[in-house]
Image (cartoon, rainbow, N blue to C red):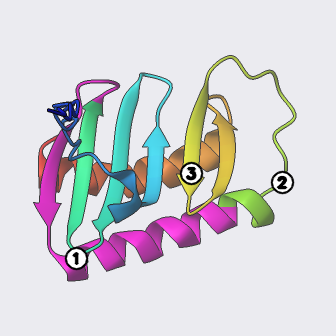
Amino acid sequence: MAFSVFAQHSEQPLAESNSDLRGQLVLFSIETPDEEVIVLERSSNFEYFISSGEKGEEVKKKIDAKEAQQLDREFASIFIKAMYELATYEGKCKKSWDLKMKGDEQKICKEDEQRHQLFEAFLDPLRKKHSF
């Protein structure tokens, strides 16, 4: 009499993560010297979200596509103006703003009044409208 023995392995599948970053596109992000972070994202379903708050404690809200596209255009205009049109800041830089837009990145010194005012003028109405 012949017996066949086959081993069975019962490994459980690994838990899947729902934080797949391929579906999220960061349109822009701003980090102020005070550790405030503002991020505009678009999902793979063309839903738009704005995240804001202190670094590591951001609150995410869904926003209207029309508003998101307007914010994206306005930020792009200011970002490009700050990067290419304004004179280079010559002073010492203690803390800076970290700005990112679709792969481009720039740092702006807090002491650079011209650029600082541009981005504060962009953020003030945004803060009021979305309560952050």
Left/right placement of residue 114 relative to residue 116 reads right
Say which residue appears at 16% left-offset and 31% top-offset: 10
Task: Say the numbered circle drawn on residue 100.
Answer: 3
Question: Looking at the image, which is closer to me, 46 or 17?
Answer: 17
Residue displayed at 85% across by 47% down: 88
Distance from the alpha carbon under mark 2 to that under mark 1: 40 Å
- From this view, report whether residue 23 is shown above or below residue 68: above
Range of the magenta residues?
54-81
Q: Position of residue 57 (x, y in %)?
A: 23, 25
**Residue 63, relative to residue 126: is it above or below?**
below
Residue 47 on image: x %, y %: 20, 72
Tag 2 secondary structure: loop
Mark carried by residue 87: 2
SS state under label 1: loop
Say whether residue 78 is left or right of residue 39.
Answer: right
Q: Which amino acid, by three-letter code, is at mark 2?
A: Ala
- Amino acid on which disc 1 is placed: Asn
* First in sequence: mark 2 vs mark 1: 1
* Circle 1 Cα neighbour tier, 10 Å, few/some/many (<14 / 14–19 / ≥20): few
Asked whether residue 16 appears in the rendered view, the answer is yes
Q: Secondary structure at mark 3?
A: strand
Q: Earlier in the sequence, mark 1 or mark 3?
A: 1
Mark closer to the observer (3, 2): 3
Dominant secondary structure (helix, strand or loop) of the stretch shown in magenta: helix
Number of residue marks = 3
Res. 108 image quadrant: top right
Identify the disc placed on residue 45: 1
Is disc 2 in contact with disc 1, using a CB cutoff of under 8 Å?
A: no
Identify the residue shown where x is 41% and y is 23%. 35
